[in-house]
Amino acid sequence: MAVANALTYDERLEALRRTKIEHTIAKQAEGAWDNDDHGRILPPPDFSFTPEPNHPSGGFFGPVAVGANFRRLLEAHPVYVDPMASIAGGYMVYFMKMRDPHWNPDLSYDHLKADQKRYGIVHGIGGTQHFAPDLRIGLALGLGGLLTKIRHYREVNAGNPDVEPGLYDGLESVIFGLQNWMRRTADQCRAMAATESRPEIQCNLLEMAEMNDWLISGPPRTFREACQWIAWYQMICRMYNGSGALDQLDETLRPFYERDVAAGILDDEAAIFHLACLFINDTQYAQLGGPGPDGKDKTSRVSFLILEALHRLKTPSNIAVRVWDGLDPEFFKLAVRYLVEDKVGAPLFMGDKGLVEGFMRNGYSLELARERVKVGCHWCAIPGREYTLNDVVKINFAAVFETALREMMAESKSPSTAELWDRFTAHLRRGVKCVADGEEFHLAHMWEVFPELPLDLTCHGVIEKGRDASHGGVEFYNMCIDGTALATVADSFAALEQRVEKEGKLTWAELMHLLDTDFADAEPQRLMLRSIPRYGSGGSRADEYAVQIVRTFAEIVKAEEKNRWFKLIPGLFSWANTIPLGKSVGALPNGRHAGAPISHGANPDPGFVGAGAPTAMAVAIAAVQPGYGNTAPMQLELDPGLSNDEAGIAALEALIRTHVALGGTQMNLNVLNKEKILEAHADPSKYPDLIVRVTGFSAYFASLSKEFRQLVVDRLISGM
């Protein structure tokens, strides 16, 4: 019987959204957060936890010590239950931030540090996560089944010298700690139910208690239980090392949905509410739609329900729609409509053609390429089968360029752009080798420093082999290397060629003086260098240089791969590194000041062209795809006046499909009001819930630092 005056799902969802905003404002008081929005809530003021070291440095290393400390943290972690939610739990701290030092000082890579600094390399040694779990493993087995599997293979592999010492102990510790946390949470639900006066909320609390009691050992049986299990798993992964990867979420949840609907125990409104509670719990990455290995579209009723849950929430989200010729047209239209209506930068869109054709160039099958799903800022991975360090490893083209330029000016009697290009490629080759050396070092040692214990639980082969995902436990090792500062360097080459060589407006010596003095008292000369036809304008020398840089980079990366036991895959992405990578680079010939941010990912620099910028950008970025299945995203800011009528939606659909047809791999889109952005930048407290897609991730604008907000503002305003 329905309870009179019972709270509706919409009313409960609005209460949950208000609570999230309250939590966000409280976190903003802690200081800036230049990262994607997380579901973390603040712990009680009296909460503290200190890991136990096992090394003279004060650090803790290896699967036994790491697993034991993480178990202790989970067992000490405060319990959080929101009675309005259908899913229990909330996380409050980051285990990663408790590590000091992050790397075992006994494992030195000093031999790499000079080139890492010289070329602005974000080396990835000690980098964590950034690959995809296969949630189906955990959903099928449950925590009890995972424990049974660990114990079985511990016995099978007894005496096997290839098994990593202590790995099974570490994996068990993670499960024991999580089970303790879940048990205490179920008890809290019962305690809250005992004093709850609203019958429907009391019933909800008792249902959560019963559900979590079961999930301590048993596998999820229903759609709601599956969402709760995923929530627990995503919480421990985020706490452990920041992992935010889910998988093809619509397909993962589809069997639970169809079974429950057939049994008459689930309707769409309840499913939407459970999904919304899952997304409030944490802002993780997942893919919707796209072709399965059999070439059939994976769009289902669950895909629509996920979009609807995000639409009703209007909070930061990182869900991607995989665009291909067979995508359900109504689903695609709805995704575009919600992007325009909600103005929260979601969903984003992935280009299947470029992703699949590119990944196959690494020697993989069509079927395997289709299994690689989007689960990170700009990256895809095969769930549970592939280790990548995607988005972790970067090389700064601007630092490579500056090194080559200054070397040429010190050594050459007749400098030229042709000679500069040769020196640039030589240094790029040396930098890529340094990156690969670092990745090989990481793969040899990460397991004994900080193994991937929570993600290991849902990988194919790790438990069976007794080897961490970073150290031979999974099937494929496709190591990422992203280039950055493409527009900065392409425009610099073109400016030198036009203003110094062709027009003679400056000599090489005069140019170097301008760079050495950071254009002091030389604003006209700086603007002259900056006012050439730039990358993105179409048919310019800068466009040609951009293509040439990317093709050369990809060739160098794949040539270096021949010297390694793992594959290397080039991409173009700066993430949030545009500011720090720019700080170490001096003034450059494109008119960029010393220490200023480098250009953003594959995007042209702001102000590269006037009218027709969206189409020009779509064409330019499609032309600079590295071509091996890792992305070079397009970041586009759209006019808030964009109509959400049929014509407006169709126009945006056409732009997305055009970019995808040209080989584009990812589109991050914002629909934002210029005046509102400027007001929020001046006083973030006026709009605490304003959301922007910063890059591959979305965040509350007020949570970003002033420096980072300015970078976003510059890009947003110039694109409108």
Image (cartoon, helix red, strand yellow):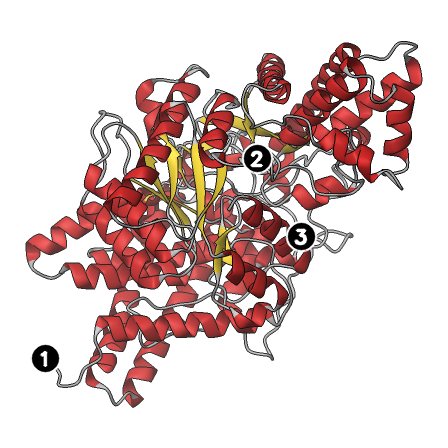
Q: Which mark is residue 465?
A: none
Q: Between residue 122 and residue 316, name the one nearer to us.
A: 316
Q: Which picture quadrant has residue 19?
A: bottom left
Q: Disc 2 and disc 1: Cα gap in Å?
A: 52 Å
* Side of 168 relative to 412 (left or right): left
Image location of residue 284, percent across then percent down: 42, 51
Q: Name the quadrant of the N terminus.
A: bottom left
Mark 2 or mark 1, whichever is nearer to me:
2
Q: Disc 1 and disc 3: Cα gap in Å?
A: 54 Å
Q: Between residue 504 and residue 672, name the one nearer to us.
A: 504
Q: Which mark is residue 573?
A: 2
Q: Would you name the residue on which mark 3 appears?
A: 60
Q: Disc 2 and disc 3: Cα gap in Å?
A: 32 Å
Image location of residue 142, percent across then percent down: 31, 52
Q: Between residue 498 and residue 120, name the one nearer to us.
A: 498
Question: In this rendering, is residue 292 above or below 335?
Answer: above
Q: Which residue is drawn at 54% across and 58% down?
A: 70
Q: SS class of the residue under badge 3? A: loop
Label 2 close to label 1 by CB (< 8 Å): no
Image location of residue 535, percent across then percent down: 60, 27
